[in-house]
Amino acid sequence: MKILLTGGAGFIGSHFACSALEKGYEIINVDKITYAGNLSNLDESLFHKNHVFHETDICDKEKLKEIFEKHRPDAVIHMAAESHVDRSIDCADEFIRTNILGTHTLLDVSLSYFKTLDPSAKSKFRFIHLSTDEVFGALGSTGKFNESMPYRPNSPYSASKASSDLLVRAYHQTYKLPTIIINASNNYGSKQYPEKLIPLTILNALEHKSLPVYGDGQQVRDWLYVGDHVEALLTLLTKGKVGESYCIGADNETTNLSLIHKICETLDHLRPSSELESYKDLITFVKDRPSHDFRYATDASKLKRDTGWEAAMSFKNGLEKTIQWYLNNLEPVSFQNARQRIGLGS
């Protein structure tokens, strides 16, 4: 199968590309290479015989048309997006442009291409759109997000992703483009750009920088190992039901403060500081960010029921594996000037 992958030089995209190539897929990788994308994330897969890279903006309709016509993909997996909540609060312009206008452009080009396929190819074609559980807003102390919940986004980022989800749904309902929408919980793992909570905490701690925590740090997030997410996406390519949306989570709920404690404790064991009794000594509390959602938790039972997928990585093992990767890769070029935000949260 030949997959056109957008955002394939980013965190999740590069993991997907490497795994898919190992399994025999062909990857047409389309990435604009913004601050959070880097070809080094692809490691040796960049030079794989079944990997082709195009440095292209998904808002560039003519260029996308050329790529579709040249490579004739069997599926599209759309990951390209602006994704950091704090940046969207500072300025939402790029989130609106990339996440909404870019998704619309990609849908339009995909639909035009889809119409040229013969009946057999049409029956196998898929457009899988990667979104977030943040489109559902915030939960109270109980319950989980599921596919039937209403959208209630609370940040410019989540609003832009909700808008893109609705466009994808509309293209299926109106034009019968075979789409699947994914609403995933917070991902973690190696190669994540360190504006995100886990890598930012690791790198700041190792440099003995303050670990500022938004509010009281009691916001709850559900964490999904990136490798498990990739396996879910590959499974949905063949087993997902067209026109459906799927929530992906791994039942790893923890507060932001508890997570930071776990990271500090793991670092105390793996790389103890000669100056601190514990990296926890670096934790400070700062003013909460606007409209900070209290709790996310994701019900993946529909995905498990339809495809048989289940998360394989325990949170303890996944977190330790992630921390060890950053200890082994402290100064890659892609991390320069990355830690620009004040608070730690997601």
Image (tube, rainbow, N blue to C red):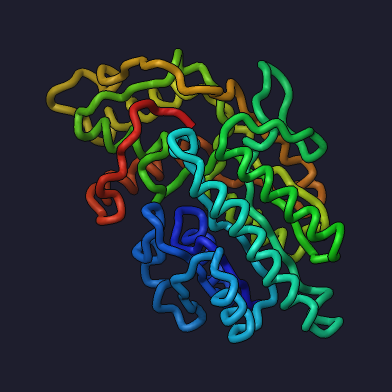
Is 131 in front, or is 308? Answer: 131
Q: Quadrant of the N terminus?
A: bottom right
Residue closer to the observer: 89 or 275:
89
- Across and down, in percent, residue 320 comes to 40, 39
Residue 242: % across, % down: 82, 60
Left/right placement of residue 166 relative to residue 213 reads right
- In the image, taking residue 173 as reference, residue 113 lies left or right, namely left
Residue in view at x 63 percent, y 58 percent: 103
Between residues 281 and 295, which one lies in front from this camera angle? 295
The structure residue drawn at horizontal position 41% and vertical position 62%, both measured from the top left corner, is 33
Percent coordinates x, y for residue 261 in the rendering? 38, 22
| Residue visible at 74% across and 48% down in the picture | 166
Q: Is residue 170 above or below residue 238?
A: above
Residue 221 falls in image quadrant: top right
Above or below, comparing residue 71 to residue 219 in the picture: below
Quarter of the image for residue 161 reads top right
The residue closer to the viewer here, 100 or 110, is 100
Going by the picture, which residue comes out furthest to the left? Answer: 274
From this view, report whether residue 124 is shown above or below residue 280.
below
Count the numbered circles shown.
0
At x 66%, y 29%, the residue is 137
Residue 14, x across and y down, in percent: 47, 61
* Camera sees residue 24: no
Q: Determine if residue 330 is in view.
A: yes
